[in-house]
Amino acid sequence: MPSNEALTPLLRQFRVLVAGGSYGGLSAALALIDLSKGRLARFNFTPDAKPPQYQIPIKITVVDERDGFYHLIGSPKALACDQYAAKTWTKFADIPALKSPNLQIVRGSISSVDCRNKVAQILDLETKETRQEKYDFFIAGTGLRRVFPTVPQSLLREKFLEEALDHKEAIRNARDGVVIIGGGAVGVEMAAELKELYPQQKITLVHSRDRLLSAEPLPDDFKERVISILKESGVEVIVGQRVIETTAVETEQGKRTWNLTLADGRKLEAGHIMSAVSKSSATSSYLPKDALTDDGYVKIRPTLQFQSTVANAEHHFAVGDIAQWGGIKRCGGAIHMGHYAATNVHQLMLAESTQLKPEFLALQNYPPVMGLALGHTAVSYSPDSGVQHGEKQLASLFGEDVGYTICWNYMRMSEPYPA
């Protein structure tokens, strides 16, 4: 990583509070540590880019309800394969890149943010006590609240592994097969992954609309390719039908099965039901209402700063899924936003310390792009490349572990904090 050996140290220490320790929040924290030490941000691949001339004392506090970094992309596999699950959740204390004296991780939640006075209320989940945290810059990256099995509900790694094991056993022992309700991105990946892991198990995917991925602004040939791959793998796909009733049935062996009724009157039997219907909500209740849309997303400028209607808006940023920005929400986009937010925070620090004019990075509008891991293959779409699919796409987009190693290495999480 290029660095500047002849650094001018600045005296003022800046306090940065980051809400959320996932892709966006951690990327912002790591990039900001790089910049404050006179190094290029780890995500900066601009040719001939010059590292900062100043070393800035900073104190970063990251607040997250979980005790570690969870690879959200891998959920469809992690919640069905306990061996893979163990890889997807790494405790923050075990991540070498986070062992910086400038960085503190708090397992907790933020209950309120006073933008005018730059102070937040934090509930520490370890001590069960609420404390005030003053800051100079705030970065919101708490994402969306998603229901199980889209994401695990556990907040501790050990509990998550138990959750994944219980879920795997429920799938494996489902005598009448598994029914997945909802044919969005999560539902189709889940169906393909279950069929790959348990080829003898009957897997049925039910979607209320006539096409899978109906909520996504993607071309029809992408959606048709997805459904053809699912059918070829042995997944039974039912589209254009809503599940209007589910009834639990206790068997003589003391096990529970389910009877499902579709809108056209058809009956399905299942030993296990998984709901992949989109039920996500923004986790922004701690922010002032004038910072949010009606749906709870943070209104941002291209610089990722809050809109000017909020007090001290220039010192408040939002990254990742919680931010209102175009395009399909992806982890790569969250990492990109974290990098840009950190760079712009650093520019403001320099401006306040040296009177230099800040040079901000600005987001561009994202085109709709998507990549789906479907068992032994993958399907992708971008405006430039169109629809592509196959094992090579799987290797390119997701590697051998549903993108875990790709994301981990890109964020350079295994690299110890350099002195």
Image (cartoon, rainbow, N blue to C red):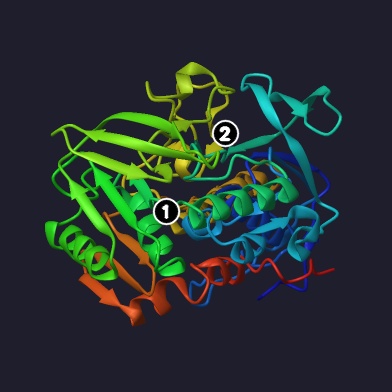
For the C terminus, the quadrant is: bottom right
- The residue drawn where x is 63% and y is 19% is 116
Badge nearest the viewer, 2 or 1: 1
Tag 2: Cα neighbours inside 10 Å, few (<14), some, or many (≥20)? many
Tag 1: Cα neighbours inside 10 Å, few (<14), some, or many (≥20)? some
Indicate left or right for 96 with 179 as reference. Answer: right
Give the percent coordinates (x, y) of residue 73: 49, 57
- Secondary element at image label 1: loop
Amino acid identity at mark 1: Arg
Give the percent coordinates (x, y) of residue 283: 53, 30
Q: Which residue is nearer to you in this view: 280 or 327?
A: 280
Q: Which residue is nearer to you in this view: 132 or 311?
A: 132
Which is more N-terminal, label 1 or label 2? Answer: 2
- Residue 75 against residue 402 in the figure, above or below: above
Q: Which residue is nearer to you in this view: 173 or 376?
A: 173
Give the percent coordinates (x, y) of residue 93: 81, 55
- Residue 283 against residue 42 in the figure, above or below: above
Give the percent coordinates (x, y) of residue 51: 64, 68
- Secondary element at image label 2: strand
- The residue drawn where x is 47% and y is 24% is 291
Indicate left or right for 258 with 15 as reference. Answer: left
Amino acid identity at mark 2: His
Tell me, for residue 182, which label it has, or none.
none
Q: Is residue 31 visible?
A: yes
Q: CA distance from mark 2 to mark 1?
A: 22 Å
Q: Which residue corresponds to mark 2?
A: 316
Residue 39's quadrant in the figure?
A: bottom right
Q: Which residue corresponds to mark 1?
A: 330
How many marks on residues? Answer: 2
Residue 86's quadrant in the figure?
A: bottom right
Residue furthest to the front: 252
Indicate left or right for 292 with 106 as reference. Answer: left
